[in-house]
Image (cartoon, coloured by chain):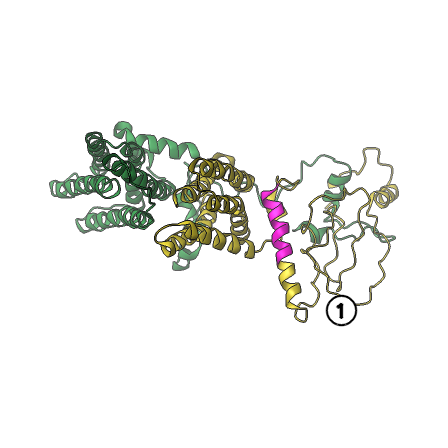
Chain colours: A green, B yellow
Amino acid sequence: MEEGYTSLPTSHLLGSVPAVVAEGKISSTVGQASTGNLQPFPPYDGGYNAPGSPISAQQTTTNWQGIFSISSYTQYFNVDSDVVIDRMISSIYPMNGFDRKIDGNPDLYGPVWISATLIFMLAALGNVGTYLKQKGVDPSTTWIFDVSYINWAACIIFGYALAVPAAFYFLLHYFGHSASLIRLWCMWGYSLFVFLPTCLLLVVPMAVFQWIITILSGAVSSWFVTLNLKAYAQASDMMVLLVSAMVLQFALALFIKIFFFA
Amino acid sequence: MSHEDTIPLHHSSQSDIDEIENLFIAGPHSATVLPARPPSPTRVSIPVSHSSPPLPPYQKVTPSSSPPPVVPAVPAAPSGSSRVGVAADAFGSSPDTLTEPVWDTVKRDLTRIVSNLKLVVFPNPFREDPGRALRDWDLWGPFFFIIFLGLTLSWSASVKKSEVFAVAFAILAAGAVILTLNVLLLGGHIIFFQSLSLLGYCLFPLDVGALICMLIGNAIVRIVVVSITLAWSSWAAYPFMSAAVNPRRKALALYPVFLMYISVGFFIIAID
């Protein structure tokens, strides 16, 4: 758009010289001369920060009006593809120091899209799994796609990923620990990643296999959460919180198995 | 800007006068002042359908004149390509649209939807820079495509027809907004409504797939048709989504788009 105003056809009038503004543009189009002193505007990666770099002060919110601005949230999405993949892998191998990896740069990209993927897989594969199981019992079963699985999955997964970390945030603050809500959201979101392969495996219509998979995924997920919450729970009174987090993760795994793959 | 900063037009630059003369020779061909056209109130021109080729940067139409002067075609321009609506509606005030017949208004919007559709989902030379191609975005096309997809899905559903429509509409409409926000949050450069428009137009192949699947009951044919249209939709959305963000975040911007299209495709197959 901006070239339309600086390059109005004035240079063809008799006796006129080309405008100064258009000089670089004309010379670059006519002669293809060196364009070393021409700067693209806006800069190509203006909104891009390297993942480790500190966030500039202008992006953080300073007043309440900042909550309506998208740019005040870009700091929580400041990750690259390889960073996200690395975090997802270390959420399955809990020994991998996930706590250190999100230090200083907790992201919300992973939690949001892991939850969205999980909702899709629960709705789609839950229908398939239910159909296969009923087909094994009664071969005359016809395929019916139950749309309400999508609503249920969306409510439960997004609700769990939002509400549980928020509740733990308030509890930790109540007991006098300083915790970051974004970090808790990030950690809990990545703890759901293990349920994605679980959904794929739960399609297999074998009850024993399904229960083994469910217990395994629940164990991995709750172990991951416990490991990351342990930093907050040095005092003994935090053991209740740790245990309740583990129980919640296990309950989610059981719920997925019982409700969506019944 | 001092004289040392200027770049010589030709490496064999003689003098300033020669330089200006060279400019005249290389300059635009629309040198003469165009005669003012008498206003014709009865015949309303449709701005989008002027198939004017993209102009060189220093040969834009001045935005002041009304009615706009007819842009003379650049002699070397290839004709017959689908370059409709690229530079046509960006400048110049459109003629009086208050007194025109309703059919003309509808026809203009339909023409615009068709030309935008050609620019987004069909091969054309502007695919490398779709943001530029879809400068004349509209939201009518996405609206129709989303409604049509929702209706097709709810017709072909056997139970809970209204719930199917509600879920499909919510996923598609909210999905476009969320995908655009995702790109913005990843630090990409994108125009909000233009992106909504593009994502909506990219649903057109899936619309076609849903229509075919509604008519054909065979499961294998449905899977094949949906796979093809899914690939087509992804192909249409790919250059625009990947160009908007930093190359290191390309996968992060593209994954949600594919997730949405795959879920819609699964919907089309699964709903019987």
Which of B171 and A147 lies nearest the eye of the viewer? A147
What residue occupies the far front of the structure in this picture? A140
Under mark 1, the amino acid is: Thr
Residue A22 % position (x, y): 73, 47
Specify whether B183 is left or right of A211.
Answer: right
Query: Which residue range is magenta in the image?
Result: B110-122
In the picture shown, does residue B193 fall above or below A111? below
- What residue is shown with label 1? B42
Crowding around mark 1 (Cα neighbors within 10 Å: few <14, some 14 to 19, many 20+) is few
Residue A216 falls in image quadrant: top left
Residue B181 % position (x, y): 45, 49
The residue drawn where x is 84% and y is 52% is A16
Residue A185 % position (x, y): 30, 44
Q: Main secondary structure of the magenta part?
A: helix
Report the number of discs: 1
Specify whether A154 is left or right of B63.
Answer: left
What residue occupies the far left of the structure in this picture? A236
Decide whether residue B116 is among the magenta residues. yes
Residue B18 falls in image quadrant: top right
Which of B65 and B151 lies nearest the eye of the viewer? B151
Specify whether A162 is left or right of B28.
Answer: left
Decide whether residue B100 is among the magenta residues. no
The residue drawn where x is 39% and y is 45% is B271
Residue A151 % position (x, y): 32, 50
User: Residue B4: in sight, yes or no?
Assistant: no
User: Residue A19: in sight, yes or no?
Assistant: yes
Q: Quadrant of the C terminus of chain A?
A: top left
The residue drawn where x is 73% and y is 54% is B50
Residue A107 falls in image quadrant: top left
Chain designation of label 1: B
Specify whether A119 is left or right of A219.
Answer: right
